[in-house]
Amino acid sequence: MADKRELSVAIIGAGAGGIMSAIKLRDSGIKKVVLFEKAADLGGTWRDNTYPGLVCDVPSHLYRFSFAPNPDWSQTFSPGSEIYAYVRKVAEDNNAEEMIRYNSEVTKLEYNNKRWRVTTTQGDQGEFDVVVSAVGILHHPVYPDIPGLDSFKGDCFHSARWNHDVSLKGKRVGIIGTGSTAVQIVGAIVDDVAHLSMFQRTPQWVMNAPNLPVAEEDKAHYRAHPEEMSAMYDQLAATMNHGFAAAIVGDNAMALEKIQEGCQQSLDQGVQDPELRAKLQPDYSAGCKRLIMSDRFYPAIQKPNAELVTDAIESIEPEGVRTRDGRLHALDVLVLCTGFDPHRFLADAEVVGRNGQTLNEAWSQGNYAYKTICVPNFPNLFFLGGPNSPIGNFSYLMTAERQFGYIEKLIGLLREGKLEEVTPKADVTAAFNQSIKDAMPQTVWASGGCQSWYYDRFGNVASWPWTFAKFEEDLSAPALQDFEAA
Ligand code: NAP
């Protein structure tokens, strides 16, 4: 059936999610699809993160779009550069680049007469019927608030802004943080540097996950038998969703116990020195912070040139890091592996919805959305990876594709002329968010006794508190009664 209404769509962000959305919208027959990207290149997190040792902790064969299977992944957990190349290839194979406007950070979205006026750093971009935000989650680096940070006279950079002009060979290198990023970097650089100091505020649970190469004959086999690769995807997805992802939301206590036992075993067996082992022992439940997958970290931190510093950092001085015991850890290079603010979404843009209300005002007491996708009073604005998305539970590409499928159905209501504006009802959205709050205490993020980036600034855990099966079911088709009638 021909569209009753011809739509134009603006997408914000040319990371994996934005590119997937642009390709699918254009292929569905929408003629005007424009992807605004603030940087000079596509790829999102895989463009920004280039640190040594970067691999994705989601098994590679689970990290792909359904329309772009990849038989060529080189390892169980493939390197970031390979994932960047995959995203680029998806864009190239599908002529997505012609839809991208680079160096165009969206600074303002304003809703008027049922259309969004889009302004970027390049000026007014005109009006669009629909806006899809695909700005990513682990995207805004957090710099630690440590006195004297600016006084350090060596090289200092955040892990997501790696300075490749700085050689680490033979240097004294400090790593602040013990998250997935820090652990991967330590494993990758320890043999190159003269001395490595890892500054730990909180120990982490580490799952021993060997990262094996994929044999050439296996790749050839996947190429010849895509149906087997697809079956493997289904099997991996089921294992992840019924095991780990169910465990962390309180739906599989036995799996959570097994995860913790496995991590404890690798700590007990993998670290010889009882003093170091005690320092690395977490006192909260596994999965409470994002679980770390690595078979390189424990061997690396036990090398003679590596040191785990557990005294709190007092200040940073020109020569290095001063800890509370008075010791100066002299350094040439300091790497801040201090994570990201995953709760910013479109906070840097002025988003003006109906009645002049801004998104920052609407979210002043915490971010919320209807089923992670849309917000009352901001019609025809849809989020990939929006508030309470299941980040950290599943493969993000899988999550984003499910969310896009739902958004596409909402856009379909506009195309078919069934609705002029898609806006979730305020009371239904409030009830949905109350159900999130009610379910959260059973998750390990809330009950596990730790602090993590899952918490927003109001002390609420901002993730999906249910299983992936519920996520799929909730996003299978829009319940029309939950939306305002046109
Ligand atoms: P993170 O998990 O948020 O870790 C930040 C680290 O910095 C923590 O150890 C934190 O200590 C420490 N820290 C922060 N401020 C500090 C301060 N002022 N003084 C001392 N220590 C401080 O960040 P991340 O390692 O970059 O990882 C973020 C997320 O990105 C991961 O959880 C994961 O989802 C994703 N990631 C994924 C991969 C992958 O393989 N797919 C790789 C890297 C990252 P506390 O624990 O005490 O707060």
Image: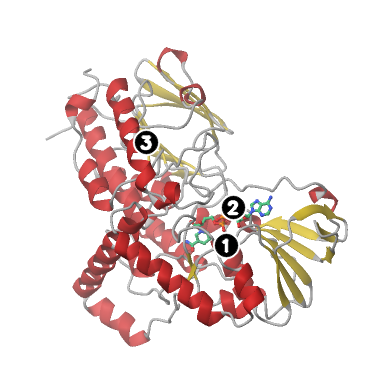
Mark 1 sits on what residue? Answer: 181
Q: Which of marks 3 and 1 is nearer the N terminus?
A: 1
Mark 2 secondary-structure assignment: loop
Mark 3 sits on what residue? Answer: 437
Viewed as shown, does residue 162 lie left or right of 420? Answer: right
In the rendered image, residue 69, in percent from the top left (x then y), is placed at 30, 66
Mark 1 secondary-structure assignment: helix
| Residue labelled 1 has its Cβ within 8 Å of some atom of ligand 1 | yes
| Residue labelled 2 has its Cβ within 8 Å of some atom of ligand 1 | yes
- Quarter of the image where the N terminus is located: top left
Viewed as shown, does residue 335 lie left or right of 259? Answer: right
The image quadrant of residue 120 is: top right
Mark 2 sits on what residue? Answer: 339
Q: Which of marks 1 and 2 is nearer the N terminus?
A: 1
Q: Which amino acid does label 1 sit on?
A: Thr
Q: Which amino acid does label 2 sit on?
A: Gly
Query: Is any part of residue 248 visible from this angle?
Result: yes
Q: How far apart are marks 1 and 2 (CA)?
A: 8 Å
The image quadrant of residue 231 is: bottom left
Ligand 1 lies in quarter:
bottom right
At x 51%, y 44%, the residue is 342
